[in-house]
Amino acid sequence: MNNKSIPATKYNFALVFFVALGSFTYGFNASIMGTVFGLAPFFSYFNLDLTGPGADYANSMIGATNGLFSAGGIIGCLLMTKLADRFGRKRTIQGICAVCVVSVIFQAAAVHIAMLLVGRFLNGLGSGMMNVIIPLYQSEVAPPHIRGRMVGAHGFCLVLGYNFAAWTGLGCYFATNPQLQWRLCLALPAVAPGILGLGSSLIPESPRWLVTQDRGTEALDILTKLHHQPGDSNNEAAQSECHAIKTQLMSESSEPKSFFGIMKKPSYRKRLLIGIFVQCIAQSTGVLVINNYQVLLYNGLGLTGYLPLLLYGVYTAWAALLNWVGAMFVDKFGRILMLTVGLVGCALMVAGEAAIVAVAAENKNNHAINAAGVFFLFVFVTFYATCIDAISYIYCTEIFPTSIRAKGVSYSVIGLFAMTLIYTQPAPIAFAQVGWKYYLVFVIVPLLGAPVVYFMFPETKGLSLEEIGTLFDDGNETSTVEVREDVAEKLDCY
C-alpha cells in the first residue's frame, strides 16, 4: 500500500495537538526565566545585584537557574530510556505531568534562592522527559506522508510556550504587587501539564508500543480509529500498517537494545550519532542563549523598561508562526535541505548581531544601531524557526526503529540539554567578560556543521517509520509496508 493512502483523520490531528500541551509545557518552562530576568522585583527579593560589587554572584546565580534546568533535563532524558518502554507512552506522559506541576510549586513558592534552584532542577527533569515523550508519541501515531507536519506540532507548540512566557512577563511587569510579578510568572507553567495530565486518560496508547507488548489487537483498533476513512470498510490501511509494524519488530527481536549494544551495531550507531549531532548542532546556533538572555541582550543595546519584554513577545510570536510554516513545508522540501539552510542562515545572522553588539557597547543611544541589533535577532529566528526548530525533532524521532526509538530519541535530546548547559551556564559571565566575542562560537560551529548535515545525513521524507531502516543498511526484508501473505498469517493484528 502506498504511504500516501494511509489517511489522517480529524481525531488524529486532534490527538497530536492535545498531547502538544506537553510541548507547550517544555517551551513555557524553558523560557520563563528569561522573562523573569526582566522583572526588577525578582532581583530585589533574592538580593541579586547585577551592577554592584555582588555582580559576579548575581551572574553565577542567573547562570545556575538555567544550568540546573539543563542538568535536570539531561537526567530526565536518561530516565526516559527506560520509562517510555517499560510503562508505555501514555502512563509516562501522566507521570511527567505530575513532576512538572510539583516543580512549579517549588519555583513559585520559593522563599530563598536554594528553593528556587531546586525547583528549576525538578522543572528541567520534567521538561526533559516531556521533550522526549511528546514528539516520540506524535511520530508513532502519524501517517508517513504528513508525519513532518504532525510532529512539527511539537516545535510549533513548544515555541508557543515561549511566546506565552513572554507575554506573561510583559503583563506581570505592570502588576502593582512586586512579588506577584515574578511569582505569577513562575506559577502559570503548571496550567498546561495539569490539563494534559487530567485529559490523558482519554488518549490512546501508542500502537507501536502495544505491538512490542504483544497486544496487536489493541494496536489495530487504535490504528483503525486514527486512520479510518469512509469507504475503507475492511480497514486495509490500518491492517497493512499493523502488519508492517509487527513484522519490523519481529526482525528486530534479536537486535541489541542497551546503549553499548546500540553502539556496537553499525546501523544503530549511525542513527544515534546522527540524532545526537542534529540536536547538538541545533543548539550550537546559540538559540537558547539568545532566548534565555534576550531581555538582557536588549538592555545591552540600550533598550530598557517594558520594551525588551515587548520585543521578546513579538520575537517568540514570530518564531511560533514560522515553526508552523516550517512544519507545512518540511514534507515537500525535505529535512536535510531545510536544516542546512537554517544552519548557514543562523550563523550569518549571529555574525551580524556580534558586530552590532560590539559597536553598541560604545553607542548605546544610537537608534540606528539598536534597530540593527533587533533586526539581526529577528532574521536569526526566522531561519531557526522555519528550518531547524521543529525539523530537528521530526528527524530525530524518525530515524530510530521502534525497538529502540524511545532510547534513541532520549539519547539524542540529551545532546540538546548538554549543549544548552555548556552554552547557557557560562553565558552571563562570558557576556560580562568577553562581550560580543562569545557570539563567534555560534558562528563557527554551525558553519562547520552545515556541510556534515547536507552531505552525510539521509533524507527521510515520505517514508514510513519502518521503511526508513533501508536508509541505514539494516538489511531487513520487511522494511516496507507490503507484507507477504505467509508472514501476515503469523501477525496478531486481528
Image (tube, grey):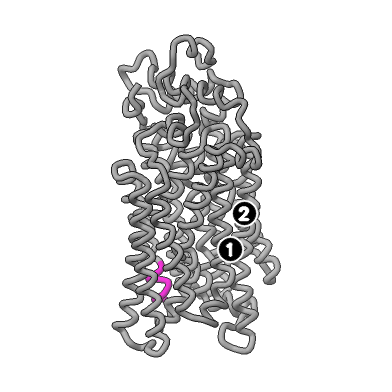
Q: Which of 195 and 160 lies nearest the eye of the viewer?
A: 160
Quadrant of residue 187 within the rendered picture? bottom right
Mark 2 surroundings: few (<14), some (14-19) or many (≥20) residues within 10 A: many
Which residue is drawn at the image coordinates 54% and 58% (left, top)?
A: 29
Q: Where does the magenta region start and end?
A: 306-312
Residue 86 appears at what percent x and percent y?
65, 34
Q: Does residue 385 appear to the left or right of 49 in the view shown?
A: left
Residue 307 appears at what percent x and percent y?
39, 76
Q: Which residue is mark 2?
A: 74
The image shows residue 154, relative to residue 205, as above or below, that is below
Q: Which of 399 and 311 lies nearest the eye of the viewer?
A: 399
Quadrant of residue 81 within the rendered picture? top right
Which residue is drawn at the image coordinates 40% and 19% (left, top)?
A: 482
**Distance from the alpha carbon under mark 1 to that under mark 2:** 9 Å
Principal secondary structure, stretch drawn in magenta: helix
Residue 11 shows which numbered tag? none
Q: Which of 207 and 489 lies nearest the eye of the viewer?
A: 489
Q: Amino acid at mark 2?
A: Ile
